[in-house]
Image (cartoon, helix red, strand yellow):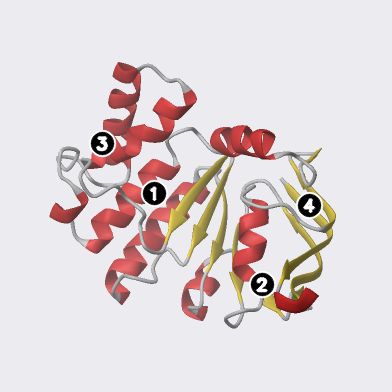
Amino acid sequence: MIKCENLQKTYPLKKGQGYQALSGIDLEIGRGEFAAVTGPSGCGKSTLLNILGLLDNPDGGRYLLEGRDVSRFDDAERSDLRLRTVGFVFQSFNLLPRFSAAENVRLPMLYRGVPKEEAAERARALLEKVGLKGKADNTPLELSGGERQRVGIARALANDPVLLLADEPTGNLDSRTGLEVMDLLRSLNAAGLTILMVTHDLNLARAAGRTIKVRDGRIEP
């Protein structure tokens, strides 16, 4: 599914200096894996996730997604591929507060050109799939933190992604609700979805099938 070869990324700073966020990442993620990325703040986890999610390009090395070298795609190519193949789950949910749960979920489908009626039907089905039957018309302000994250997961699944990227998906939840969200992610993985999750919680990391430790822009052995 994913193959990274010597990935490098440097962000420019003032006076011509640069901060090297990734210093030669070699990584393979197989189809159907559930992997957790851990490491201290500033180690390069988020940069790696942004590149894998086609939100950014590396400065050096190669990134192959399903056998295609996407590391040199332009913005339009990355945007199109991202819409069709990658789902994102965020720590802060990133839901539109004035939209209902169903409206939040169907939005990615509308961007892709799915007819409104079909998108609405699929959105309600996805909300049921993540345990939110009867909550489709509620806005995020009318939902608990755990319910909001379930909406976020349903939205991430809207366009049938082959890869789900979760950035601290339980970071804003209490421990019990966080475990419920992890159970949901594991069930999605058991159904065949490839998941890469960034987390500071080592207990949650151990619940994934594999742990990848990042430090100073490199993967630790």
Under circle 2, the secondary element is loop
The answer to whether any part of residue 211 appears in the image is no
As shown in the figure, which amino acid type bears the numbered disc 3? Ala
**Answer yes or no: do the residues labelled 4 and 3 have beta carbons within 8 Å?**
no
**Answer yes or no: do the residues labelled 1 and 4 have beta carbons within 8 Å?**
no
Sequence-wise first label, 1 or 2: 2
198 or 78, which lies in front? Answer: 78
**Answer yes or no: do the residues labelled 3 and 1 have beta carbons within 8 Å?**
no
Under circle 3, the secondary element is helix
Q: Is residue 177 left or right of residue 155?
A: left
132 or 53, which lies in front? Answer: 53
Under circle 4, the secondary element is strand
At label 2, counting other C-alpha atoms closer than 10 Å, the crowd grade (few under 14, some 14-19, many 20 or more) is many
The residue at which mark 1 appears reads as: 153
The residue at which mark 3 appears reads as: 102
Please name which of the two marks, 1 or 2, marks the residue nearer to the observer. Answer: 2
57 or 69, which lies in front? Answer: 57
As shown in the figure, which amino acid type bears the numbered disc 1? Ile
As shown in the figure, which amino acid type bears the numbered disc 4? Lys
Sequence-wise first label, 3 or 1: 3
Q: Residue at x 29, y 17 (%)?
A: 117
70 or 192, which lies in front? Answer: 70
The spot of residue 191 in percent (x, y) is 50, 43
The residue at which mark 4 appears reads as: 3
Distance between mark 4 and mark 3 Cα atoms: 35 Å
The residue at which mark 2 appears reads as: 44
